[in-house]
Image: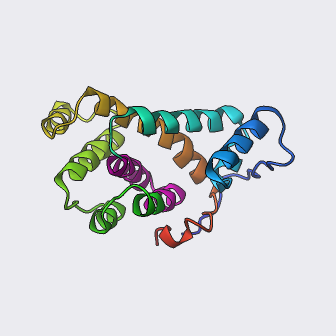
Amino acid sequence: MARAPLFHIAPADPDDADGEAHALMAGARQKLGFLPNMYTYMAKLPPVLDGYLRTYDDFRTQSGFSPAEQETVFLTISRVNGCHYCTAAHSMIAEKTSGVPARSLAALRDGRPLPDPDLQAVATFTEAMVVSRGNPGKAAVDAFLAAGYGERQVLGVVLAIACKTFSNYVNHLAATPVDDMFAPFEPA
């Protein structure tokens, strides 16, 4: 889905950037084997890229969610926020590396009920958190806990929302072009 930028922001050039921006982009390129377009926009203010990278890594390593549950959280946030870039990227990761079943991935992308009850509980709670701006009500929290999740996962959703706030919001502002590797997963 092509969209127009909300304001003009040129991506940072990783070869011309200096200081923290250069270091962050070089580290990301080394870790991932490529530099996602999104990172070049976030690097225009290095603390944005640094905040994203830190919260992303912390969510992946400390949230207590399985890889499929992690993608469920990220895709739910990105879908609710209408982020074309992150929906495409996390759809590719969900399919290729995180083990999200095809039917669940399709349902996540469309905002339909998921066939897996655990992933559905994660998606429901995550959406409630995003839509309510962190105030989903006691019933939503209790339902998530009753589904077998705990304090760590509740706070993990908060961490993921912080992470996706960096990326979804920058992508909205910049109309970040989807990288070629994610393009087959771009929402219509």
What count of labels does the image hold? Answer: 0
Q: Is residue 120 above or below residue 21?
A: below
The x, y position of residue 142, in whole percent, is: 15, 33
The structure residue drawn at horizontal position 15% and vertical position 41%, both measured from the top left corner, is 147
The structure residue drawn at horizontal position 17% and vertical position 53%, both measured from the top left corner, is 117
Q: Is residue 81 above or below residue 102?
A: above
Q: Is residue 47 above or below residue 3?
A: above
Q: Which image quarter: residue 101?
A: bottom left
The x, y position of residue 113, in whole percent, is: 21, 60
The x, y position of residue 163, in whole percent, is: 49, 39
Please tell me which residue lies in front, 103 or 81.
103
140 vs 167, left or right, is left
Q: Is residue 180 part of the magenta span, yes or no?
A: no
Q: Which residues are magenta?
A: 67-91
Prevalent SS, magenta region:
helix
Q: Is residue 78 above or below residue 182?
A: above
The structure residue drawn at horizontal position 33% and vertical position 63%, both measured from the top left corner, is 105
Most distant residue in the top direction: 151
The x, y position of residue 95, in whole percent, is: 41, 63
Please tell me which residue lies in front, 76 or 2.
76
Please tell me which residue lies in front, 133 or 98.
98
81 vs 50, left or right, is left
The structure residue drawn at horizontal position 36% and vertical position 42%, both measured from the top left corner, is 130
117 vs 94, left or right, is left
Most distant residue in the right direction: 16
Q: Is residue 90 part of the magenta span, yes or no?
A: yes
